[in-house]
Image (cartoon, grey):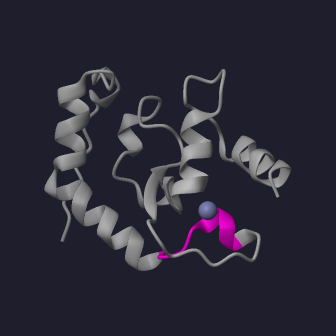
Amino acid sequence: MIMLIHNTNNHLLNWDDYKIRHDFYQSKEWRMLRAFKLQLNPLCEFCFKHNKFIDKDIEVDHIIDIKERPDLRFTLSNLQSLCKSCHSYKTTDSGTNGKITNTRLEQIINNNK
Ligand SMILES: [Zn+2]
């Protein structure tokens, strides 16, 4: 069972700090939650909406960026399974510092169909 730690100082964490990010992504809690999410949603959730069934190289994405809401980093409802292609659209959209919303991701994917 995962113990979720609700730290009210979460917003003070500096997610630009490489070590803090590294420690989070290497943490046992994140690895367990990530594996659990992939069991629940083994398919890319965006591709699935467009009737595409992609189950290769699925990555777990924070819907609301971890920098904006570090307190939601272990919140299941803030996670989505994305294929590499959809995930890279989300993290490389120009002019947004790598942070885009699901609505914007939907637009990009629709434009690229
Ligand atoms: Zn996809």
Position of residue 35 measured from the top left corner of the image (x, y, whole percent):
30, 69
Eyeballing the image, is 78 above or below 20?
Answer: below
Position of residue 36 measured from the top left corner of the image (x, y, whole percent):
33, 72
* Magenta span: 41-48
User: Quick one: 85 or 47, which is closer to the camera?
Assistant: 85
User: Quick one: 73 or 80, which is closer to the camera?
Assistant: 80
Say left or right for 28 vs 80: left
User: Quick one: 13 or 91, which is closer to the camera?
Assistant: 91
Q: How many marks?
A: 0
Give ligand 1's quarter of the image.
bottom right
Position of residue 88 measured from the top left corner of the image (x, y, whole percent):
55, 45
User: Quick one: 110 or 35, which is closer to the camera?
Assistant: 110
The residue depicted at 26 percent of the width and 34 percent of the height is 21
In which quadrant of the rendered image does the N terminus lie? Answer: bottom left
The residue depicted at 49 percent of the width and 53 percent of the height is 78
The residue depicted at 51 percent of the width and 76 percent of the height is 55
**Figure quadrant of residue 9:** top left
